[in-house]
Amino acid sequence: MENKKYNISVEATLEVIGGKWKCVILCHLTHGKKRTSELKRLMPNITQKMLTQQLRELEEDGVINRIIYQQIPPKVEYELSDYGRSLEPILNALCAWGDTHITKIYGDKSLVLEDSVLNQ
């Protein structure tokens, strides 16, 4: 691993979970293992290329595990690693803040939130 210098610790966090999609992927994985196709269905606005890239980066950072089943046709699932589970309080806090923000700006959350297990 290369020696890096951060101005503040949050930079290291954002290096791992920053960007538009990584936290969304991680939130979905808090509800259990998912195949790539399931994640794509849950996140219809992400491109397949971006989903694959984000999953690879999360795996490289040790936040998720890629499970390959030796069968035909091949089956691959993703799950949070133990290290990734340590992010759950952070993800929950981000969701709670988002709920508060949406309510403040839009009033009724149902006007802007998709119907999803994550929005219960």
Image (cartoon, rainbow, N blue to C red):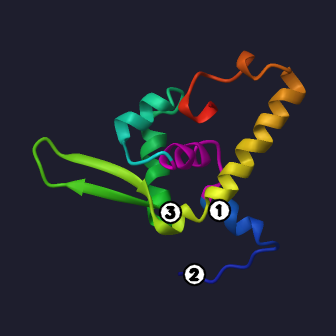
Can you say which quadrant of the picture contains the C terminus? top right
Q: Which residues are magenta?
A: 17-30
Q: CA distance from mark 3 to mark 1?
A: 12 Å
Q: Quadrant of residue 2?
A: bottom right
Q: Which residue is mark 1?
A: 15
In primary-sequence order, the first of circles 3 and 1 is 1
Element assignment for label 1: helix
| Residue drawn at x 77%, y 38% as measured from the top left | 98
Q: Residue furthest top?
A: 111
Single out the mark in the foreground, 2 or 3: 3
Q: Which mark is residue 63?
A: 3
Three-letter amino acid code at the position of disc 3: Val
Q: Looking at the image, which residue sits at the far front?
A: 120
Residue 91: give x, y in percent of width and height.
66, 51
> What distance separates the C-alpha of mark 1 from that of mark 2?
14 Å
Q: Residues within 10 Å of mark 1 (few under 14, many from 20)?
A: few
**How busy is the neighbourhood of tag 3: few (under 14 within 10 Å), some, or many (20 plus)?**
many
Up the image or down, 8 lies above or below 120; here it is: below
Give the percent coordinates (x, y) of residue 40.
43, 33
Q: Of residues 23 and 33, which is closer to you in this image?
A: 33
Mark carried by residue 2: 2
- Tell me the SS state at disc 3: loop
Is 83 in the magenta? no
